[in-house]
Image: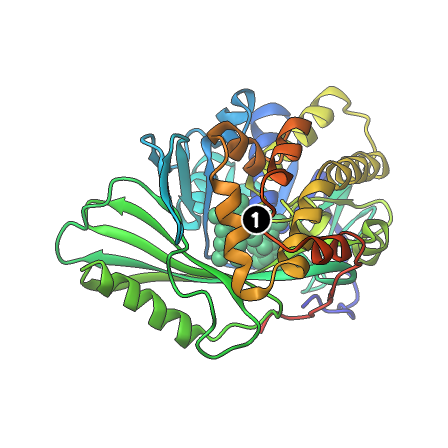
């Protein structure tokens, strides 16, 4: 948590054109885009942790990022699969053709510290407070800046509604080659109802063949409550590995509880985290896919847009940059209304044990439609197509869900 009572500030140490607070995915990419596209911009990336990017693995479909923006991710040590990916449901299995990419945060950190000038990256540096004129660090140091961008983590809000995506993934080094060549984005042929019952449902396993003998297995479920029993999830991952005949040791692990947003009052939620004159970006700024909780494509798009506007308008003030980001966030919220409606269908119209049918119905659709869905760029014909056919949920429940305001997403700290 950010200290609310910082030590009395010492005099300003330096003036920056931009200070980015939070060197996670969004902040790190903004720094990289400024470095590449706004030459001469004196920015600082302030990160509380010892490394940039935390401890994650970010994945995305190649088509999530428009071709003209892909260069930002070029140069990272990515894992890539160009032979499509598999999905498995109780009723059918299928291979879809889209290429898939994945980046571990260790590689994110390594690339950023190699490319960014060292004086621009401040690790193990915690911001205590942010304002339009700069940042006061937890040790009392004051950093003055023309513009400040807040990229600290997402903050749950009672003004947003929805459910949660809960997951735990383990990276295995297998004793022998595992034999997988493509990612398995969803294996939903697994049990759907919780063995320990906490309202969870729609469960699937996600598998990435990271090399011939390394495999990443993640157990995921869409849950009503932000609760995780890590031991249960580890047991399920081990069981999945065993069922596939993969023996080996666990060499890394990630876990997360991410919001699945089904509605709410975006202006009120933003007002809770907004600081006058400070721009908001990343998941905290609302730049996520409501249903998948992914942020990477939006973080790339935002980083490039911010760098380009600063390069084009060197006189741009911090307050103007804050408005620029807030307008983009509002547009993003409006553009993703359809996915929030689908989240309501998932959490409120579908009975927990039958949520799998909603995804089973969706994945039977055309591959390009699935690509546009993940990228958050579904066309109107796509939207109609997803909703037509034999409905996977009961119509009266679907109608109630359409008009429901959902459950508040006001958890302070994920359990
Ligand atoms: C385990 C996991 C896996 C995920 N996988 C994917 C995926 O495959 N694809 C995808 O698109 N999305 C994924 N997501 C969702 C989302 O993309 C990530 O959460 C993403 O990291 C969000 O980026 P961000 O920069 O907004 O926030 P974060 O990455 O959370 O970064 C915020 C940063 O701010 C720093 N910070 C906090 N307070 C301070 C302070 N006071 N001073 C300085 N620094 C501070 C933190 O240390 C952190 O580094 C995943 C999330 C998790 C948790």
Q: Nearer the viewer, residue 379 or 272?
A: 379
Give the image location of residue 153, x and y in percent: 64, 56
Residue 7 vs 259, above or below: the answer is below
Residue 199 vs 203, above or below: the answer is below
Give the image location of residue 256, x and y in percent: 51, 62
Residue 274 left/right relative to 27: right
Considering the image in quadrants, where does the N terminus appear? Answer: bottom right
Residue 78 left/right relative to 387: left
Q: Secondary structure at mark 1?
A: loop
Q: Residues within 10 Å of mark 1 (few under 14, many from 20)?
A: some
Residue 194 left/right relative to 240: right
Give the image location of residue 231, x and y in percent: 40, 76
For the point 35% across and 35% down, the residue is: 80
Q: Residue furthest left?
A: 176
Considering the image in quadrants, where does the C terminus appear? Answer: bottom right
Report whether the residue tagged 1 is closer than 8 Å to ligand 1. Answer: yes
Toward which corner of the image does residue 26 lie, by quadrant? top right
Q: How many marks?
A: 1
Residue 413 vs 382, above or below: the answer is below
For the point 28% across and 52% down, the residue is: 215
* Residue 97 at least partly seen: yes
């Amino acid at each position: 948590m950010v200290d609310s009572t910082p030590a009395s500030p010492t005099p300003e140490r330096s003036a920056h054109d931009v200070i980015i607070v939070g060197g996670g995915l969004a902040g790190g990419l903004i720094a990289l885009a400024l470095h590449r596209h706004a030459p001469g911009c004196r920015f600082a990336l302030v990160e509380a942790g010892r490394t940039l990017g935390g401890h994650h693995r970010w994945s995305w479909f190649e088509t999530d990022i428009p071709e003209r923006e892909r260069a930002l991710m070029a140069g990272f040590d990515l894992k890539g699969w160009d032979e499509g990916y598999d999905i498995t449901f109780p009723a059918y299995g299928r291979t879809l053709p889209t290429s898939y990419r994945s980046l571990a945060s260790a590689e994110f950190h390594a690339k950023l510290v190699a490319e960014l000038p060292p004086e621009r990256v401040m690790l193990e540096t915690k911001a205590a407070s942010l304002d339009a004129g700069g940042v006061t660090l937890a040790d009392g140091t004051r950093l003055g800046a023309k513009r400040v961008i807040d990229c600290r983590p997402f903050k749950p809000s009672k003004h947003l509604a929805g459910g949660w995506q809960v997951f735990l993934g383990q990276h295995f080094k297998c004793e022998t080659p595992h034999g997988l060549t493509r990612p398995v984005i969803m294996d939903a042929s697994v049990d759907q109802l919780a063995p320990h019952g906490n309202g969870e449902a729609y469960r699937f396993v996600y598998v990435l063949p990271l090399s011939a003998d390394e495999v990443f297995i993640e157990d995921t479920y869409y849950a009503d409550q932000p609760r995780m029993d890590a031991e249960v999830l580890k047991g399920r991952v081990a069981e999945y590995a065993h069922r596939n005949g993969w023996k080996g040791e666990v060499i890394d692990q990630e876990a997360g509880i991410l919001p699945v947003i089904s509605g709410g009052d975006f202006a009120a939620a933003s007002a809770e985290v907004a600081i006058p004159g400070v721009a908001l970006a990343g998941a905290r700024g609302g730049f996520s896919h409501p249903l998948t909780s992914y942020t990477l494509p939006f973080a790339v798009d935002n980083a490039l847009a911010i760098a380009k506007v600063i390069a084009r308008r060197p006189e741009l003030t911090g307050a103007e940059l804050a408005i620029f980001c807030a307008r983009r966030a509002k547009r993003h919220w409006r553009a993703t209304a359809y996915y929030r409606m689908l989240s309501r269908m998932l959490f409120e119209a579908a009975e927990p044990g039958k949520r799998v049918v909603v995804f089973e119905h969706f994945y039977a659709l055309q591959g390009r439609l699935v690509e546009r869905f993940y990228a958050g760029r579904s066309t109107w014909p796509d939207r109609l197509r997803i909703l037509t056919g034999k409905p996977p949920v009961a119509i009266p429940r679907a109608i109630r869900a359409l008009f429901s305001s959902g459950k508040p997403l006001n958890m302070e700290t994920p359990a």
